[in-house]
Image: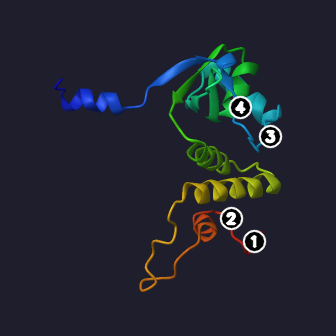
Amino acid sequence: MFSTEESRADAQREKVLEIPLSELHPFKDHPFKVKDDEAMMETADSIRQYGVLVPAIARPDPNGGYELVAGHRRHRASELAGKDTMPVIVRDLDDDQATIIMVDSNLQRESLLPSERAFAYKMKLEAIKHQGARTDLTSAQVGPKLTAAEKIAENSPDSKSTN
């Protein structure tokens, strides 16, 4: 079949689905605590009033439903707001891809405990190493080659001199 540029672009565009909260399960080994604190209550109030503004990311769970990769706080706030569904982008991700997305989406939060942040960096490092991603692609003639840990540190807002 022939397709136009527009229909090809539509096929590649990710779809946002309204998925029942009961079909969304937490990411295995999710290291971040989801607390019912004041910030959570504010998020629930916002969701009650405006809905979830940014879709969560999930992947199909072989045992049924979906595994949340990013959006655990939005999921909990949606429950507290009395919602039955939330917007989700479903992606086919392997464990390493899902771990990297989960870690990166949570490292943006300012309220992480130092232990959560450290464990998250460790998870990301292990996922990158497991993927076999080349992190030493800088030529020694141009600059020093970087290890996976150095690459993560270089891209991190956390300074090793302040931690």
Judged from the image, the secondary structure of the residue bearing numbered disc 4 is: loop
Judged from the image, the secondary structure of the residue bearing numbered disc 1 is: loop
Say which residue appears at 65% left-offset and 59% top-offset. Answer: 125
Q: Mark 4 points at which residue?
A: 26
Q: What residue type is labelled 1?
A: Thr
* Pointers 1 and 4 in contact (C-beta within 8 Å): no
Spatial CA distance of label 3 from label 1 is 24 Å
| Chain-order first, disc 1 or disc 4 | 4
Q: Residues within 10 Å of mark 1 (few under 14, many from 20)?
A: few
Q: Which amino acid does label 2 sit on?
A: Asp
Q: Quadrant of the N terminus?
A: top left
**Residue 34 vertical position relative to residue 141 in the rendered view, above or below:** above
**Residue 34 vertical position relative to residue 135 in the rendered view, above or below:** above
Spatial CA distance of label 2 from label 3 is 20 Å
* Pointers 3 and 4 in contact (C-beta within 8 Å): no
**Would you identify the image quadrant in which residue 126 lies?**
bottom right
Q: Which amino acid does label 3 sit on?
A: Lys
Say which residue appears at 69% left-offset and 22% top-offset. Answer: 78
Q: Name the residue under label 3.
A: 33
* Pointers 1 and 2 in contact (C-beta within 8 Å): yes
Q: Position of residue 127 (x, y in %)?
A: 62, 53
**Residue 103 vertical position relative to residue 40 in the rendered view, above or below:** below
